[in-house]
Image (cartoon, rainbow, N blue to C red):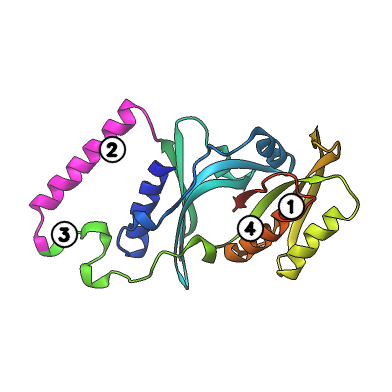
Amino acid sequence: GIDAAHKATIMSAIAFGVPMQFAKAHVEGITKLSAIDIKYAEQLGYRIKLLGITKKVPSGIELRVHPTLIPTKRLLANVEGAMNAVQVHGDAVGTTLYYGKGAGSEPTASAVIADLVDVTRLHTADPLNRVPHLAFQPNAMSSLSVLPMSEVVTSYYLRLRVADQAGVLAKLTGLLAQADISIDAVLQREADQVSQAGENQTDVIILTHDTREGTLNDVLAQMQALPTVMAPIVRIRKE
């Protein structure tokens, strides 16, 4: 996710007039994704894509890269192979999508030549009429800070490997309710494993509505401490 984070950092600076702050970006790659989560996501009507996301919200700037569930019918969910896409939401124009090759010798050469042309144009332009670096004049730069992930608000996919016992699901949903986290969907599937004590296990998949990540982290810690939760909880963000 490092490459995507560099690109998202540059685009956040151009879009919002903030200094580039790569060190504050939240970066997760795809190494911890498992095939079972890809399968469950498809059953729920989603695909998992590595997204670089930056948003301007009243409290600051979101700057994050991580695997993300996207509804299958969305254009972003169907970007494959060497193709890249950038989705932009503007105040007046609404949502637009830019799609094309992001890898290969010719696309890379085209981008480099375009940069050289821009440098030459700027060099020969009147200094007072040049487009400033990052598109904002120095005195117009914003001081909005990059939010820590604990303050980001989004929705989530949760997968819990639990003992197949009565009352387990009620306990899990009860913890979410106590934290005022509402549930969008619940899916229960038989797991292919049996615990060392000989207990049957099941996978519980929960989709939440939007909530603050710090609040969810507290609930996940409580869930993980339950004796009926048999494995580390998997959490994937959803957009």
Q: Residue furthest right?
A: 166
Tell me the SS state at disc 4: strand
Q: Which residues are magenta?
A: 102-127
- The reply to whether dot 4 and dot 3 touch (C-beta < 8 Å) is no
Q: Residue furthest top?
A: 105
Marks 1 and 2: which is nearer the front? 1
Residue at which label 2 appears: 111
Determine the CA span between mark 1 and mark 2.
42 Å
Q: Is residue 169 left or right of residue 65?
A: right
Residue at which label 3 appears: 130
Considering only order in the chain, which callout, 2 or 4, is on the residue closer to the N terminus? Answer: 2
Q: Is residue 100 left or right of residue 176?
A: left
Residue 143 sits above or below residue 95 on the image: below
* Amino acid tagged 4: Ser
Considering only order in the chain, which callout, 3 or 4, is on the residue closer to the N terminus? Answer: 3
Residue 219 sits above or below residue 161 on the image: below
At horizontal 83% and vertical 38% (from top left) the residue drawn is 197
Marks 4 and 2: which is nearer the front? 4
Residue at which label 4 appears: 155
* Amino acid tagged 1: Ile
Determine the CA span between mark 4 and mark 3.
42 Å
At horizontal 62% and vertical 66% (from top left) the residue drawn is 215
Residue 112 occupies which quadrant of the picture?
A: top left
Tell me the SS state at disc 2: helix
Marks 4 and 3: which is nearer the front? 4
- The reply to whether dot 2 and dot 3 touch (C-beta < 8 Å) is no
Mark 3 burial class by Cα count in 10 Å: few <14, some 14-19, many 20+: few
Determine the CA span between mark 4 and mark 2.
35 Å
